[in-house]
Amino acid sequence: MATIGNNSINAKLVLLGDMGTGKSSLVLRFVKGQFLEFQESTIGAAFFSQTLAVSDATVKLEIWDTAGQERYHSLAPMYYRGAAAAIIVYDISRMESFERAKKWVQELQKQGNPSMVTSLVGNKCDLEDKREVLTEASEARTYAEDNGLFFMETSAKTAINVNDIFYEIARRLPRAQPAQQPAGMVIADRPAEISRASTCCS
Amino acid sequence: MDEEYDVIVLGTGLKECILSGLLSVDGLKVLHMDRNDYYGGESTSLSLVQLWKRFRSNDKPPELLGSSREYNVDMIPKFMMANGTLVRVLIRTGVTKYLNFKAVDGSFVYNNGKIYKVPATDVEALKSTLMGLFEKRRARKFFIYVQDYEDDDPKSHEGLDLNKVTTRDVISKYGLEDNTVDFIGHALALHRDDSYLDEPAIYTVKRMKLYAESLARFQGGSPYIYPLYGLGELPQGFARLSAVYGGTYMLNKPECKVEFDTDGKAYGVTSEGETAKCKKVVCDPSYLPDKVKKVGRVARAICIMSHPIPNTNDSHSVQIILPQKQLGRRSDMYVFCCSYAHNVAPKGKYIAFVSTEAETDHPETELKPGIDLLGPVDETFFDIYDRYEPANHDEQDNCFISTSYDATTHFESTVQDVISMYKKITGKELDLSVDLSAASAAGEDA
Ligand SMILES: Nc1nc2c(ncn2[C@@H]2O[C@H](COP(=O)(O)OP(=O)(O)OP(=O)(O)O)[C@@H](O)[C@H]2O)c(=O)[nH]1
Ligand SMILES: [Mg+2]
């Protein structure tokens, strides 16, 4: 859930989408400004946090990457539990990945957090010559509009629109949340935390 | 599936998931499969609809109970000792960052038909109504001895070598009554039977210290903590750890048949006609029924209620231990209660469990002393399950099988099994050195 305290919001953001669509690349581009042509399924890091300033608040996004569990449809329900935002990624050069993205949309609707900010992202838009999923004309954009998602095409490679999705999410996160039950405590190993405070782990 | 793995883990119960995570972190190539389409195996948490399907053979829970999805009913309910080994494992592996915990409100013990807050320190001993005036003072002295005892400070030993002297001898030195010994042994030191009395006192003293230190840790009314949304979160957290370190996850895999070569050594696992090769197989007893023996049965009752357990100061979460002697039984009985405060039920609802090692075929009558403590209940489910232990030799067949979960409502025995399996699988000791005093519980608002 998004939580607020003096204009600062903490929110869990999850990435979903078919394997190879560029989920990890999008996070890597956003958090570290990098792109790897042969991005290996990232080992040991699937949890990042990044703080962004939008006009009226500071938003700390806790970003969860799937760690490959979606590959054989084995994503654990805890993954989306309490998520305030989701980015569903497909690869514009693979129609199949768009079909899969629609399945994720349904899955999220079933999990039912109506206030979740959900975005549909067509990644790899630098691969225009291999495009299979059309932007307009009854495909991606219309689908997104029909399902109340906000939609963008991105490229983790050229960085087009990558920061924009994360900032747009930060802007759309609900500001006034009804008072929640206290979420309990996080048990943290303090010293270790400081040493990796820059990118990973709240 | 046609790859070769170091380890194939079968079943996503808590023990299997912790092992899978630890082994992946060690750099081993792990494939983790489950025949079910959900995580947790026997240690999953169920929604109300799932609960009804499992125990009532229909999927229509009464509407009165509220939204099915808001229920997370543990099948193996257990609390974690705040400074216990499981918390060390969680901190060591960083799995804590996927979970939120809340302290458990109360820890009680049953004595002569009534329940009392478990006194854990010299100060609490003096306040407790569990003991008479003179007994309190004796107990206080004993508690001070335990609190001051340090392995490396011989002065604090008061001339006793706790590695040699039995618990019985130490206790008789303080002249404690049987009732006091009972709550110390079973509710503080968490022994499951009375054999500890004839074992070196050090085991009991260490466990009492763990209890007291855990109690002091979060200023709660008990030494226990419990994750929001139920224990089902734990296996999922460790599975994620495993996946993050390269482990491959496949749920909903029928059959999962372990394949053996002519020497009887496991070399792979077949599901849906495909065989994945491996050097070792780790699994729960249900995946290798021919290699386990039945060692007991757990009787349990799962109750849904609309009020806290009476006489627990309105605790929204509580453990009550009923020592065997108090009931004239051979094994302790445990009551565990959790509620909407831990997000395991809708607002106003409580879930209580009563469990014990079954001594008869009639859980209804056997569990009565525990159930009688609950007051009126909305709904009760009775159940008995078999407990298994491995009966194989892992050095001969490469199979590492976990022991079924016992009736206790805390994790101490569960983690010991994981640690000893880890040692057998890897040949090395699990490094659990973490600075618990540096680890803190950061409060976070919703
Ligand atoms: N041309 C192009 N390639 C990209 C882009 N984003 C990612 N890739 C490449 O696509 C491949 C897969 O990217 P990942 O980021 O690993 O995809 P993923 O969704 O995290 O994949 P899994 O973790 O396996 O589910 C890598 O080789 C990337 O270099 C992009 O915007 N344009
Ligand atoms: Mg990835």
Image (spheres, rainbow, N blue to C red):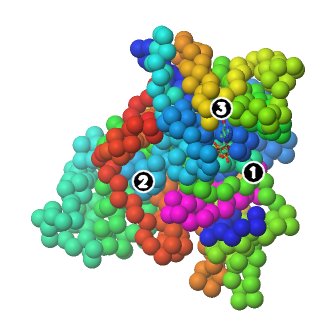
Residue in the foreground of this view, choosing between B250 and B230: B250
- B308 falls in the magenta region: no
Q: Which mark is drawn over residue A72? A: 1
List x then y, in percent, for residue A92.
Answer: 77, 33
What residue sits 32% from the left and 73% below the top? B200
**Does the numbered disc 3 mark a residue whose Cβ is under 8 Å from ligand 1?**
yes
State which region is magenta: B12-37
What residue sits 14% from the left and 67% below the top? B154
Amino acid type of the residue that numbered disc 1 sits on in the rendered structure: Tyr
List x then y, in percent, for residue A151.
Answer: 72, 21
Q: State the image quarter where residue B205 is shown.
A: bottom left
Amino acid type of the residue that numbered disc 2 sits on in the rendered structure: Arg
Q: Nearer the viewer, mark 3 or mark 2?
A: 3
Amino acid type of the residue that numbered disc 3 sits on in the rendered structure: Ser
Per the image, the residue denoted by label 2 is B92
Q: Is residue B429 above or below residue B61?
A: below
Which chain hosts label 3? A
Residue in the foreground of this view, choosing between B15 and B435: B435
Residue in the foreground of this view, choosing between B389 and B407: B389
- Residues at marks 2 and 1 on the same chain: no
Ligand number 1: quarter of image? top right
Which chain hosts label 2? B
What residue sits 28% from the left and 43% below the top? B124
Per the image, the residue denoted by label 3 is A155
Q: Indicate the quadrant containing the N terminus of chain B: top left, top right, bottom left or bottom right.
A: bottom right
Q: Residues within 10 Å of mark 2 (few under 14, many from 20)?
A: some
- Would residue A10 be found to the left or right of residue B214 on screen? right
Q: Nearer the viewer, mark 2 or mark 1?
A: 1
Under circle 3, the secondary element is loop
**CA separation in Å, label 2 and label 1:** 28 Å
